[in-house]
Image: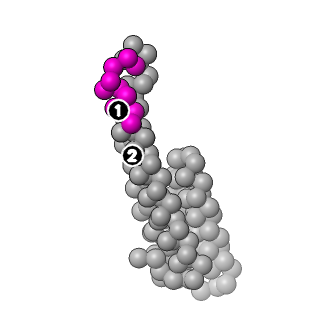
Amino acid sequence: MAKDNLAKYRRSVTIAYICMFFALFTVVTSLLAYLFARKVTVIDDAEVWLHAQALWVMRNSLIYFILMMFASIWFIPLYFYYWDTYLWVTACTVIGVVFVLIAFLYLLNTWIKGISKYIKNKAVF
């Protein structure tokens, strides 16, 4: 494998990890991390640990995106102003906040685990 290809693949995975970190603040960058990591997984001549890192980013970005979409469902009753007086709407909001917290901690944990293995040039799985 040429050194310039390896540097290009590493740069793509590094950008994917940066986007994965910013996904803690906005979900859109989770999709960007997925796309940057996908560029490495479709290449045949990348090293095995880079494939594993890219698959790790893809997997966890997708899981985080699904968790956030599920958490956002719980906030729908807040849209209707009249329903705001009911106790079940407050309960849905609390459940939504709990699911957002779970998703946030999940992505933070997987990002720390992945970036620590990436710095050591090792497979993360």
Q: Is residue 98 above or below residue 52?
A: above
Is 42 left, or right, of 21 in this rendering? left
Disc 1 crowd rating (10 Å Cα; few below 14, some 14-19, many 20+) is: some
Give the SS element for disc 2.
Answer: helix
Along the line of sight, the residue nearer the viewer: 25 or 38: 25
Q: Which residue is drawn at 55% across and 59% down?
A: 20
| Residue at the outermost top position | 82
Give the number of the disc on residue 62. Answer: none
* Mark 2 crowdedness (10 Å alpha carbons): few <14, some 14-19, many ≥20: some
Give the residue at x 60% y 73%: 9
Quarter where residue 70 is shown: top left
What secondary structure is the magenta-colored segment mainly? Answer: helix
Is residue 65 on the magenta stretch? no
Give amino acid for label 1: Cys
Earlier-in-chain disc, 1 versus 2 = 1
Residue 118 on image: x %, y %:
56, 76
Looking at the picture, which amino acid does disc 2 mark? Phe
Identify the colour scheme used. Answer: one colour
Label 1 and label 2: CA atoms lie apart by: 11 Å
Disc 1 is placed on an element classified as helix
Span colored in magenta: 84-94
Q: Residue extending furthest right?
A: 4
Above or below for 100 versus 88: below
Q: Is residue 81 visible?
A: yes
Residues 102 and 13: in front is 102
Which label number is shown at residue 99? 2
Circle 1 residue: 92
Query: Residue 63, position in %: x, y?
Result: 40, 56
